[in-house]
Image (cartoon, helix red, strand yellow):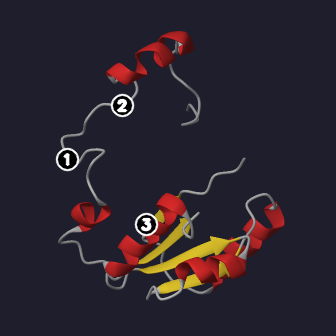
């Protein structure tokens, strides 16, 4: 059985890069949403009460907007962060948000975060992998 991470056919990277703007890699899914859609439009009518989410990168930029949107829809959002004080400032006043220490550049930190979440016994309904590593 092939690993899901092994490509089953050779990809022409040069052609992909050249044609991506024409949709070679991404095709519309017919959702009715596009680049101009707001987070409130996307989440409208969805009740996430009782759902648990983890949003890496959830305290800045697009991740912060994602956190706000999920929390406003009722989800409890766990935001792992390397800099807890910065995250506290950015997330101040947002209900249903929990902070947890995690540094994505430290495997021990990642393991500790995962173990703590699993030990909490809470289900994970949504995983938003938004953090960037430069």
Q: What secondary structure is marked by label 1?
A: loop
| Circle number at residue 12 | none
Position of residue 134 relative to residue 106, above or below, is above
Residue topped by disc 1: 31
Marks 2 & 3, CB-CB < 8 Å contact: no
Which quarter of the picture shows residue 23?
A: top left
**Residue 25, image x and y in percent?**
40, 26
Query: Does residue 16 appear in this view?
Result: yes
Q: Is 126 situated above or below 122?
A: above
Q: CA distance from mark 2 to mark 3?
A: 23 Å
What is the crowding at mark 2: few (fewer than 14 residues within 10 Å), some, or many (at least 20)? few
The crowd level at tag 1 (other Cα within 10 Å; few <14, some 14-19, many 20+) is few
* Residue depicted at x 73% and y 60%: 104
Residue 71 vertical position relative to residue 62 in the rendered view, above or below? below
- N-terminal-most mark, 3 or 1: 1
In the image, taking residue 99 as reference, residue 77 lies left or right, namely left
Mark 2 or 3: the one toward you: 3
Q: What residue is drawn where x is 59% and y is 29%?
A: 6
Residue that label 3 marks? 65
Residue under numbered circle 2? 26
Q: Residue 36 in the image: x percent, y percent?
A: 27, 48
Please state the horizontal and vertical placement of residue 92, each as a whole percent of the image: 53, 86
Callout 3 crowding tier (Cα within 10 Å): few <14, some 14–19, many ≥20:
some
Distance from the alpha carbon under mark 3 to that under mark 1: 20 Å
Measuring 22% from the left and 48% from the top, which residue is drawn there? 33
């Amino acid at each position: 059985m092939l690993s899901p991470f092994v490509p089953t056919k050779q990809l022409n990277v040069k052609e992909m890069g050249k044609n991506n703007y024409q949709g070679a890699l991404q095709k519309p899914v017919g959702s009715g949403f596009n680049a101009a859609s707001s987070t409130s439009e996307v989440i409208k009518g969805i009740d996430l009460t009782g759902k648990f989410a983890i949003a890496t990168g959830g305290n800045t930029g697009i991740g912060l907007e994602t956190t706000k949107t999920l929390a406003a829809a009722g989800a409890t959002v766990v935001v792992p962060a390397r800099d807890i004080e910065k995250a506290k400032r950015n997330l101040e006043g947002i209900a249903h948000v929990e902070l947890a220490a995690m540094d994505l550049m430290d495997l021990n930190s990642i393991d500790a975060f995962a173990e703590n979440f699993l030990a909490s016994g809470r289900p994970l309904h949504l995983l938003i992998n938004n953090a960037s590593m430069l």
